[in-house]
Amino acid sequence: MKIFCVGRNYAEHAAELGNDIPDEPVLFMKPKSALLQPHMPFYYPEFTNELHYEVELVLRISKNGKYIQERHASKYYNAITVGIDFTARDLQNDLKEKGLPWEKAKAWDNSAAVGKFIDFNPLAQKDEMNFKLLKNKELVQSGHTGQMIFNFNQIIANISQYFSLNIGDLVFTGTPKGVGECVVGDELEAFLEDQSLLQVEVK
Ligand code: ZN
């Protein structure tokens, strides 16, 4: 099982971190060990002093594929949820500045929190989907699918040009603006529309 992540997929988020709008999806990966198992505690890592939340829509791959065309991509995922791409922002800034890979800032154990999946039929989905993150019951991030630079099908098609997609792989599709810090004791709760699908307490 692989975890793909898309960076800079919302224009206002790219801008808030001082990045340009990409002309093809920015991809990175997290290993299986990055997956925070449901209801397991999340501990503030000792190697960062600037832990950030990034709420994202997460797709679950339902069919194996490679070189998938955009017009067929919607057949390759059938479940969706919200997740948090936890990021050691201080480390990431340091690595970016040096032109080094991001894994130490992004792919550490338990850095990928994933909510409860719900069935998703992209062909039946007519409207934009809204999602949001509350920190200590206050709204900190909200986004909708219409703001994405690359939509779900474009992302799937692009990933599959480089990597095989396998059943059970996860795709974090990027975070909207409003990323910020969390500290020990914070309670994060992520919603897809009005459904609360993920709760994480930072310990
Ligand atoms: Zn992210």
Image (spheres, helix red, strand yellow):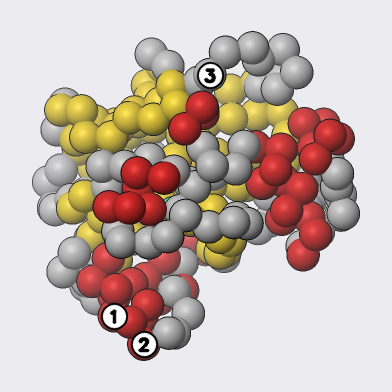
Left or right: 200 in relation to 71:
left
Q: 74 and 58: which one is in front?
A: 74
CA gap, disc 2 and disc 3? 38 Å
Q: How many marks?
A: 3
Query: Residue sitting at 65 percent across and 37 percent down?
Result: 152
Q: Are marks 2 and 1 in contact (CB under 8 Å)?
A: yes
Under circle 2, the secondary element is helix
The response on whether ligand 1 sits within 8 Å of label 3 is no
Query: Residue sitting at 23 percent across and 60 percent down?
Result: 51
Callout 3 amino acid: Glu
Under circle 1, the secondary element is helix
For label 1, the residue is 94
Q: Relative to 147, is 124 above or below?
A: above
Callout 1 amino acid: Asp
Q: Tell me the crowding category of disc 1: few under 14, some 14 to 19, or many 20 or more residues within 10 angstroms, Cα based.
A: few
Specify the label residue 103 is tagged with: none
- Residue 12 is at least partly visible in this image: yes
Specify the label residue 98 is tagged with: 2
For label 3, the residue is 128
- Residue 109 is at least partly visible in this image: no
Query: Residue sitting at 41 percent across and 45 percent down?
Result: 11
Give how far across and how far down residue 126 sits, in percent.
64, 12
Under circle 3, the secondary element is loop
Callout 2 amino acid: Lys
Q: Are marks 3 and 1 in contact (CB under 8 Å)?
A: no
Q: Tell me the crowding category of disc 3: few under 14, some 14 to 19, or many 20 or more residues within 10 angstroms, Cα based.
A: few
Dot 2 or dot 3, earlier in sequence: 2
CA gap, disc 2 and disc 1? 6 Å
The response on whether ligand 1 sits within 8 Å of label 2 is no
Q: Quadrant of residue 20?
A: bottom left
CA gap, disc 3 and disc 1? 36 Å
